[in-house]
Amino acid sequence: MPDNFYLMDRAWTLHSVAEILHAAMPEDSADTLPLRSVVAHLGELAKELAEAIVSTEIGDARTTKPNEAS
């Protein structure tokens, strides 16, 4: 199973790619699929995921006693 650092790195990578795609895409129009909005939403979800992993990692570090660290 991947460690939290790896998962956090992947989530931030997804967020960054979504941000780049969002910036490069034209505005959504009424007669097309809302792809730019979907990409923006994916970026927001990836950011939330990365921040949740960071919070979990920090919480784990605070609750782990020094002699319990692996």
Image: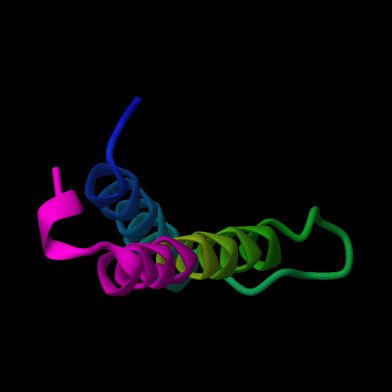
Rendered-image quadrant of the C terminus:
top left
Name the spot of residue 55 as percent of width and height, x first: 41, 72
Q: Nearer the viewer, residue 31 or 66?
A: 66
Task: Tell me if 19 is positioned left or right of 65 in this view.
Answer: right
State the residue lying farthest toward the right. 31
Residue 50 belongs to magenta span: no
* Residue at the spot 15% in from the left edge and 51% down from the top edge: 69
* Residue at the spot 31% in from the left edge and 48% down from the top edge: 4
Name the spot of residue 8 as percent of width and height, x first: 32, 54
- Tally the marks: 0
Q: How is the image coloured?
A: rainbow
Q: Give the quadrant of residue 56.
A: bottom left
Residue 54 belongs to magenta span: yes
Q: Nearer the viewer, residue 68 or 48?
A: 68
- State whether the magenta stretch is mostly helix, strand or loop: helix
Task: Tell me if 40 is positioned left or right of 30 in this view.
Answer: left
Residue 24 seen in the figure = no
Rendered-image quadrant of the N terminus:
top left
Task: Tell me if 63 is positioned left or right of 45 in this view.
Answer: left
Magenta stretch: give its range: 51-70
Q: Nearer the viewer, residue 9 or 54?
A: 54
Q: Give the quadrant of residue 24.
A: bottom left
Residue 9 seen in the figure = yes
Name the spot of residue 25 as percent of width and height, x first: 50, 64
* Residue at the spot 68% in from the left edge and 59% down from the top edge: 38
Name the spot of residue 35 as percent of width and height, x first: 68, 56
* Residue at the spot 11% in from the left edge and 55% down from the top edge: 67
State the residue lying farthest toward the top. 1
